[in-house]
Image (cartoon, rainbow, N blue to C red):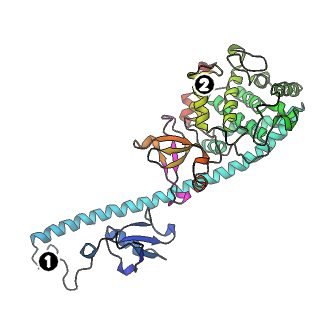
Amino acid sequence: MPFKPLKIEDLRIGHYVKLECSWWRHPFAKNIFKVTTAAELRLIKKISKLTLFYDPELSDTGSEIEEKPPEGQGYSFPGSSAQVSGDQKVHLFDAERQDREEEAKEHKIRVLAEDRGKRREAYRERRNQLKKTERAYEDAAKQTKIALKNMASGDIAGLRMAENLLSDLTKSLGEDRIVMALLEVMNSKDTEDPLFVHAMNVCVLSMLVGKIMGLSGKDLTTLGLGALAHDIGYLKIPRAVCLTTAGFAREGANLKLHIEAGLSGIGRIPEFPEPGIQIIAQHHERLNGRGYPHGLTRDQISLLAKIVMIVDEYDELCNGQDDEEGLTPYEALSLMYKNATVRKTGEFDEEILILVIKTLGVYPPGTLVELNDGSIGVVISINPQCRTKPQVMIYESDVPQDEAVIVDLSQDEELSIEKSLRPQEISKVAKNYLCPNRVTGFFPSSSEISLFSQARQAVS
């Protein structure tokens, strides 16, 4: 039966009601529920600008709905002149118990209201940080474009600009919220310059891995320079040959040319560090000798190049030339791990690859997931102690986006991730709610940095 209008003065315990008013005007978790206590009754009657409805079929009827006692027939209380029967004593005991239950429920409602307020504030803070970082990212992208073009021409001014950019980035690596936001806004598809977006992605992720490995400040800067410039040779090849609107062409062009072209430009800048040049020369080599241009093997490839080749492969798998064929972060990491440990292809250093996976998490932030209860959400942060149980923001159509529920799967034994999802597998409404417009992102806690501070010895 459809809901019917209900006057506020006629509201009783037992009514199954629907509240029509602004979400902010009431403290309840939902706007449709059964009134079960006097506390809820009082709260509803205090709501301003409320239009009230009820469902007769779902409401308790007749004597089950609490009514005021008939006039002149009030209840007897202890100490009154009226005699209290055994039945009345039981009733009074039940009334005391109901009062306690109502107080507990009122407390729960207050806690829910406070929780909603905290969620709104957390959402606003996160959104503001993302906007601020996105503006900084756009500025950095412009600087990267100028710096790479100058370096490709052998201009030392490009190197100096890149060094300044990396200096700012290194400082940001120490700020948890900034780096989390930076990595969340990476990889936007809405760009006309995929080369520079790819360069920044590989640079940021490589430096993050290098920092966790415990590289020195000098080595970290060199790693950043090499990663930023690893594909600089594409600037010397006609755009129509080496680029498509979505990324790099894997066929129809001699890709080996971009390494030679990159080295020729960087070679005219004597100040460019030699380990950075090795990154440009070796990032397409593979440890099994099946890479190019020279077919180098494990011991002939530098540590920094081993880092960049893995991050470069990961980013291209996620953000390749075809949006439909691009893998989710989870799929990309799973494929690389399977190739390394099951198929034993021997392309990448397994210890560095595992460290990259630990850095990004099994389900990197930005990954859309389906939980075992059927709900869908987006991973917003990993749990370094339990990488299969990250924090997930849940999509609920009846909950405002800025009050979205965030579940810490490490604290909830009943919930777990069933599978990762592609953006095209969920509705447009859910996609806009969860905003999975960036596919890569992670920043570990300070303890995470300490946890892997000795990793460099293990992989060098």
In the rendered image, the vertical position of residue 252 relative to residue 19, given as above or below: above
Percent x, y of residue 403: 52, 57
Query: Are there few (<14), some (14-19), or many (20+) residues within 10 Å of tag 2?
Result: some
Question: Relative to 139, does residue 100 appear above or below in the rendering?
Answer: below
Residue at position x 75%, y 24% in the image = 279
433 to 87, vertically: above or below: above
Majority SS type along the magenta span: loop
What's the magenta region?
383-406
Q: Which residue is identified by label 2?
A: 339
Q: Indicate left or right for 39 with 112 as reference.
A: left
Disc 1 residue type (three-letter): Ser
Pick whichever, 7 or 181, lies toward us. 7
Q: Quadrant of the N terminus?
A: bottom left
**Label 2 element class:** helix
Is 252 part of what is drawn in magenta?
no
User: Which residue is depicted at the point 31% across and 65% down?
Assistant: 102
Q: What residue sits right under mark 1 in the picture?
A: 80
> Residue 401 in magenta?
yes
